[in-house]
Amino acid sequence: MSSGTGKRIVVTGATGNVGTSVVRLLSEDPRIASVLGLARRIPDWSPPKTDWAAVDLAAEGSGLAEQFSGADAVVHLAWAFQPTHDPAATWRTNVLGSMRVFEAVATTGVPVLVHASSVGAYSPGPKDEAVDESWPTHGWPDAAYCREKAYLERALDTFERDHPATRVVRMRPAFLFRRESASEQRRIFGGRFLPGPAARPELLPVLPDIPGLRMQALHTDDAANAYRLALHSDVRGAFNLAADPPVDVRLLGEMFDARPVRLSRTVARSAIAAAWGLHLLPASPHLFDAVLRLPLMDCTRARTELGWRPEHTAPEVLEELLLGLRQGAGARTEPLRGRKVG
């Protein structure tokens, strides 16, 4: 481990979409002495001041206390989106694995825990106005992703009550995209055989206009910067993170030069459910239900208390993702490996 007078930070899920951005930013920060990245597979990537350890959070005896010993902060990002057909498997990694992280933080006395929550933790809310961090976080119960994020919000409530000396920060970002994550996100949501070159505006003359399909996006690097800022602050609690403007069919129609065509929720969900049931589509219809109900988030607290500003607008984020899909873009870690199909 690198030595220095700065902070020692441990990052779980360090090889994923958010993890690689967080590790890179921290490795470039002169106030950070060293970074320890935890992942199931050690990558062929060595940023400055960074060491790696192979850890599977789903496994008993993962040795987290040893890895956390002496750390100034733990940034907990590890998350498994699949298999969507086996919610018990994602529960073992996401919920039980996170509980092991929380317990190890308490056991070793790490003073700061920054946890990756999500807009998916929020209860159904409005699409025509933004809610702040006080909006209820009970998730959408049918979607495993939302259910697990909401459960961990309750677990952190208990953790904060029992360990008041630990400063806990909960980041609740919108959907996170960047060019290097395109191949991974195609595999997670669209399936490994969905051809990336199909992500071209000229191939989409019409777009489905589904009631409630209005959401927010954010560049992964902008989210990572919020994590970095939280490490150098004394803030506590939750922070909404999203870029403007909200993404809806009007915005997508302008980007793709496509005509919106009204499509009912029932028809759209039936198509997604059929493809998911046949294992042709990894994203479940339950997640689709949740997306239609997620509220828009107000990010005033992040701006005023963290001094955070996203550098990318939502259209810029989507354009970068589409470019990455066409190029089969990726990065030098196993979760982000590039793969061009079609």
Image (spheres, grey):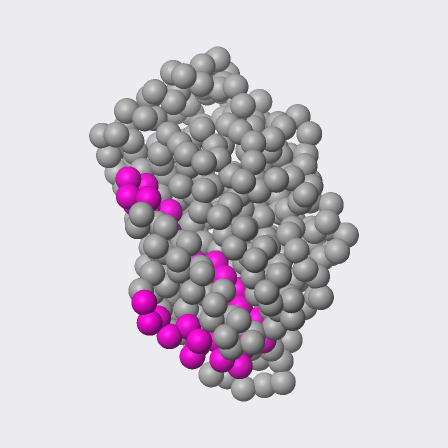
Q: Nearer the viewer, residue 241 or 63?
A: 63
Is 286 magenta? The answer is no
**Residue 186, can we see it?**
no
Q: Nearer the viewer, residue 309 or 71?
A: 71
- Please tell me which residue is depicted at 63% across the width and 28% down the height of the picture: 126
Q: Is residue 52 above or below residue 57?
A: below
Query: Horizontal placement of 130 versus 342: left or right?
Result: right
- Tell me how many marks there are: 0
Q: Main secondary structure of the magenta part?
A: loop
Query: Residue 160 location, x and y as percent?
Result: 61, 61
Task: Residue at the far left: name it.
Answer: 278
Q: Quadrant of the C terminus?
A: top left
Query: Horizontal placement of 266 versus 34: left or right?
Result: left
Query: Residue 203 location, x and y as percent?
Result: 39, 24
Is 66 magenta? The answer is yes
Query: Residue 286 location, x and y as percent?
Result: 40, 32
- Please tell me which residue is depicted at 32% across the width and 26% down the height of the picture: 273
**Residue 253, can we see it?**
yes
Query: Residue 133 location, x and y as percent?
Result: 67, 45
Q: Nearer the viewer, residue 335 or 104?
A: 104
- Please tell me which residue is depicted at 39% across the width and 20% down the height of the picture: 268
Task: Residue at the far right: name it.
Answer: 304
Q: Is residue 68 above or below residue 127?
A: below
Q: Which residues are magenta?
A: 60-87
- Choose top left, top right, bottom left or bottom right for residue 294: top right
Q: Is residue 145 above or below residue 292?
A: below
- Please tell me which residue is depicted at 62% across the width and 61% down the height of the picture: 161
- Choose top left, top right, bottom left or bottom right for residue 86: top left
Q: Is residue 165 above or below residue 194?
A: below
